[in-house]
Image (tube, helix red, strand yellow):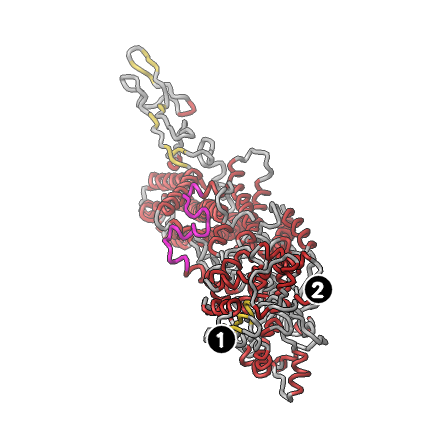
């Protein structure tokens, strides 16, 4: 009973792979011929009638039933013509459906790409809020091109860009175009965005091998997108990176902060842009002698964000003890012009004419040219040669009067000094600007020169010259501008106002900026202006920056400090009761004096074990980026 | 082949898949630690997997090509398809992409994956159900076979009328049996085949038996057999129709997936952050 269908299904051969099948198959009368694979189906007669005299007779084969009853027509046409009915096979229908869906999708895609939503279609996700709030202001079409070189191209252009690297700007170039303040363009793709020479040799070698192994051309081609992945949502942390990725280039790798991370040897490191302060001597000697409590928090107060301030400033922290001594050092004033004692007759006898010289300054050789005067005189080539002969640290008391060349050089300086005073009597500010431009080897601006002479007018130099050279009495002794004529010393002096005097600062800045070829002049000037007993004692506390030798007049704000490799946030730490006392971490080292010449901390380095107690993966975390910055060297305010 | 063979093959293939996945995922850690993007690696791997999965359709178009047994290809297709889910998760993570293109692509992927899993279930259960009917038929021949049943039943009834002159069976046949035997079942039956109608018709035929003449009884017995055949045929049509329909859907989703994958690849390469 169950074998009814066996071998049933009609005659013919099933070809389910063919695109067409006979439409009569269902009726049990499958087409004998066709349809062809292309769907063509001829009409076929069951026989080809044979002429028999004037009539025709059927010649249908016996296997198809033999001659039919109706027979051919009078014209000889077969009466049993099969009309083929081509019908698409199931496979063909499926192929057409799949092709239709694909074409529909392709067409819809082309329509969308041609519409104004073309960029919205391909955006993989929302930008982070920081980028979104900037880019949302631009037109939709231009938004992609802000960061992607292919952003303005057509869909065809995208295919070309996908297949070939575009010769135009890279995406990193576009990143740096906006983040000009974040990264110097020349180091934008360098590891840690610093010159490769700044990296340790071992790391450079490892980096070169690494970049070669992953197919990069040079070790300084780390694109921004290596670490920063956009389109991950508004709240996505673009700076998030795994510890493993941090160590990709490092020669020495380790498993975790607790295991393998090097011990601290110099952390916290003393800032190179800081004011020298000896914590030990203040705590153990000065405060102890005055029976005052040395409280860290009196200077290092917490800011509104909870971070520790570096200092509260001179007036609050230092003035009560140091102001009297500082002002006492300023009583002599800062000499802009001062005539040393010269034996004019001796010079003339030796054939070296000093020209006119103040009578009050004639006598046995004695005294020095003040630092400011040396700076101004050095602008004249012949004066500079004379100083080269005599030395910028010249004291005329030590002049070798048997040396004709030394006497000639002294005479040249005397003439130059007179000429200097005469020119000061013209336009002091312009004179200083011109002469310091020569000495510094760069154009000194008018406002810069104005700071050097403050409110000095030509009245004081004119009166001084008239008094000293012509013996005319002058009633100008001291003006409200801070400049005064010291007749006893034959000097034109400036009287500093106290701590942070702008004129004193301006001249020290000039001295610090002297070019290398004027080293001897700088050393002589620093010896006078920045020595331990100098006027204002400025350099006792204000160090010169290790980077540019400029004096650090005020402590940089957090936004002005160079972005360090290692950072530390006090706020979350001092909240812990056991860390509320600064000494819990900061133990004073056995350093007796603090040098202003080089950064040196008077605190013992922290122990890594102190941090490891909390900084474990399951506790406070041990991510590299918790303590280390990748982009270093720039002030955080320019990030 | 024995059931034991298939069980052993399943365990072996599952273990092989797990091993391949673990080996494939291991380089991702190395890739991440070397500042490459794991998304790129998993993306290319996934695209390669999709292309290999698509090749099964092409392989089936050239059955005579010396490219290995289709059964082997199907096994590779099944396990690679299952493994591709792990690659997709590694590529995208436990989230849903928010972009239009990426969201559509992910939808197409999971649509294709789920339809594939559904197909796996259907191809493992329907053949067993069909085997229980005893005789196997080719799907394309079902209309022809239905016609044969209708013709056979009609001949039996006409002969009975001619022999006995009674119209009891003929009337019942015309009103109830012929519409059932001559036409395919509704689409609803295709989704949920039942033998309810068959039992109802056979019950009615049985209840009329006492009114039939001898010739009609003989014809009725033949009709009993033909109704059962038609029911088996309908069952085959429904179940094989589900398999054919599933393939329609799976292939359409695959076409969408491949096109969107290519579009995704082009946009990613065009808009990537640069070679460095």
Q: What is the chain letter for disc 2?
A: A
Q: Secondary structure at mark 2?
A: loop
User: Looking at the image, which is closer to me, A604 or A83?
Assistant: A604
- Let me know if residue B140 is in the magenta part: no
Check residue A260 in the rendering and tell me which mark sits there, or answer none: 2
Please tell me whether the stretch drawn in magenta is mainly helix, strand or loop: helix
User: Looking at the image, which is closer to me, A419 or A131?
Assistant: A419
Q: Residues within 10 Å of mark 1 (few under 14, many from 20)?
A: some
State the count of labels.
2
Q: Which of disc 2 and disc 1 is earlier in sequence?
A: 2
Q: Is residue A174 above or below residue A461?
A: above
Q: Specify the quadrant of the image occupied by residue B48.
A: top right
Q: Residue at x 33, y 25 (%)?
A: A80
Q: Is residue B2 above or below residue A577?
A: above
Image coords of residue B36 (percent x, y): 59, 52
User: Looking at the image, which is closer to me, A241 or B197?
Assistant: A241
Please give left or right for residue A350 compared with residue B42 in the image.
right
Work out which residue is located at the far right of the displayed protein and give it. A590
Quadrant for the N terminus of chain B, please.
top right
Q: Is residue A476 above or below residue B189?
A: below
Image coords of residue A457 (percent x, y): 45, 68
Check residue A477 in the rendering and tell me which mark sits there, or answer none: 1
Check residue B171 in the rendering and tell me which mark sits there, or answer none: none
């Amino acid at each position: 009973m169950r074998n009814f269908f066996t071998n049933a299904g009609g005659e013919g051969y099933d070809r389910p792979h063919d695109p067409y099948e006979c439409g009569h198959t269902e009726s049990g009368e499958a087409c004998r011929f066709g349809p062809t694979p292309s769907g063509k189906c001829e009409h076929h007669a069951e026989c080809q009638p044979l002429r028999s005299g004037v009539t025709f007779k059927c010649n249908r084969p016996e296997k198809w039933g033999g001659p039919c009853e109706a027979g051919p027509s009078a014209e000889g046409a077969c009466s049993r013509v099969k009309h083929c009915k081509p019908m698409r096979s199931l496979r063909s229908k499926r192929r057409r459906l799949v092709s239709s869906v694909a074409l529909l999708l392709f067409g819809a895609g082309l329509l969308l790409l041609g519409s104004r939503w073309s960029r919205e279609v391909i955006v993989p996700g929302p930008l982070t809020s920081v980028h979104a709030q900037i880019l949302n202001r631009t037109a939709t079409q231009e938004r992609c091109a802000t960061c992607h070189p292919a952003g303005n191209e057509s869909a065809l252009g995208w295919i070309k860009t996908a297949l070939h690297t575009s010769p135009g700007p890279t995406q990193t170039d576009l990143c740096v175009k906006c983040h000009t303040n974040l990264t110097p363009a020349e180091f934008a793709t360098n590891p840690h965005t610093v010159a490769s020479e700044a990296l340790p040799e071992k790391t450079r070698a490892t980096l070169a091998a690494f970049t070669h192994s992953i197919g990069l051309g040079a070790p300084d081609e780390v694109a921004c997108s290596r670490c920063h992945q956009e389109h991950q949502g508004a709240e996505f942390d673009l700076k998030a990176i795994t510890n493993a990725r941090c160590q990709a280039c490092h020669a020495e790798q380790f498993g975790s902060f607790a295991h393998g991370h090097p011990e601290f040897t110099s952390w916290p490191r003393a800032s190179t842009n800081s004011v020298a302060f000896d914590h030990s001597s203040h705590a153990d000697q000065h405060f102890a002698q005055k029976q005052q409590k040395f409280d860290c928090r009196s200077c290092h107060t917490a800011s509104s964000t909870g971070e520790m301030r570096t200092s509260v400033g001179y007036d609050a922290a230092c003035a009560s003890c140091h102001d009297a001594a500082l002002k006492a050092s300023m009583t002599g004033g800062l000499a802009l012009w001062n005539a040393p004692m010269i034996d004019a007759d001796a010079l003339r006898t030796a054939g070296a004419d000093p020209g006119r010289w103040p009578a009050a300054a004639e006598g046995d050789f004695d005294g020095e040219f003040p630092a400011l005067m040396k700076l101004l005189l050095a602008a004249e080539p012949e004066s500079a040669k004379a100083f080269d002969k005599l030395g910028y640290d010249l004291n005329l008391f030590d002049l070798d009067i048997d040396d004709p060349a030394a006497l000639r050089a002294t005479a040249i300086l005397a003439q130059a000094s007179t000429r200097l005073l005469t020119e000061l009597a013209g336009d002091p500010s312009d004179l200083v600007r011109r002469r310091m431009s020569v000495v510094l080897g760069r154009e000194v601006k008018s406002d810069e020169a104005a700071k050097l002479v403050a409110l000095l007018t030509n009245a004081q130099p004119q009166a001084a010259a008239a008094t000293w050279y012509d013996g005319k009495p002058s009633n100008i002794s001291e003006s409200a501008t801070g400049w005064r004529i010291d007749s006893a010393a034959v000097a034109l002096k400036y009287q500093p106002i106290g701590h942070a005097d702008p004129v004193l600062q301006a001249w020290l800045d000039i001295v610090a900026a002297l070019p290398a070829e004027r080293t001897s002049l700088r050393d002589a000037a620093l010896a006078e202006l920045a020595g331990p007993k100098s006027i204002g004692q400025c350099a006792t506390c204000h160090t010169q920056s290790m980077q540019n030798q400029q004096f650090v007049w005020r402590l940089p704000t957090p936004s002005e400090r160079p972005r360090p490799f290692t950072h530390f946030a006090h706020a979350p730490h001092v909240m812990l009761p056991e860390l509320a006392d600064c000494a819990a971490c900061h133990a004073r080292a056995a350093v007796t004096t603090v040098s202003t010449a080089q950064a040196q901390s008077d605190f013992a380095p922290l122990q890594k074990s102190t941090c490891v107690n909390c900084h474990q993966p399951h506790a406070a975390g041990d991510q590299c980026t918790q303590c280390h910055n990748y982009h270093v060297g720039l002030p955080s305010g320019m990030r | 082949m024995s059931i034991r063979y298939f069980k052993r093959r399943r365990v072996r293939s599952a273990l092989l898949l797990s091993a391949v996945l673990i080996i494939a995922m291991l380089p991702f850690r190395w890739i991440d630690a070397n500042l490459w993007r794991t998304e790129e690696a998993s993306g290319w791997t996934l695209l390669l997997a999709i292309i290999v999965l698509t090749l099964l359709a092409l392989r089936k178009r050239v059955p005579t090509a010396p490219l290995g047994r289709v059964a082997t290809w199907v096994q590779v297709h099944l396990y690679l398809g299952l493994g591709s889910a792990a690659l997709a998760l590694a590529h995208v993570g436990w989230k849903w992409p928010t972009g239009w293109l990426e969201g559509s692509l992910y939808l197409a992927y999971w649509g294709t994956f789920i339809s594939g899993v559904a197909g796996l279930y259907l191809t493992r259960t329907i053949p067993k159900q069909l085997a229980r009917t005893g005789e196997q038929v080719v799907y394309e021949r079902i209309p022809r076979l239905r016609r044969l049943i209708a013709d056979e039943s009609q001949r039996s009834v006409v002969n009975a009328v001619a022999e006995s002159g009674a119209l009891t069976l003929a009337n019942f046949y015309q009103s109830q049996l012929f519409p059932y035997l001559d036409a395919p079942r509704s689409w609803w039956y295709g989704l949920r085949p039942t033998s309810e109608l068959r039992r109802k018709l056979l019950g009615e035929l049985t209840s009329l038996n006492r009114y039939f003449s001898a010739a009609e009884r003989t014809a009725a017995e033949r009709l009993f057999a033909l109704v059962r055949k038609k029911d088996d045929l309908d069952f085959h049509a429904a179940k094989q129709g589900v398999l054919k329909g599933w393939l329609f859907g799976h292939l359409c989703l695959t076409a969408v997936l491949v096109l969107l994958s290519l579009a995704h690849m082009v946009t990613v390469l065009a808009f990537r952050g640069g070679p460095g």
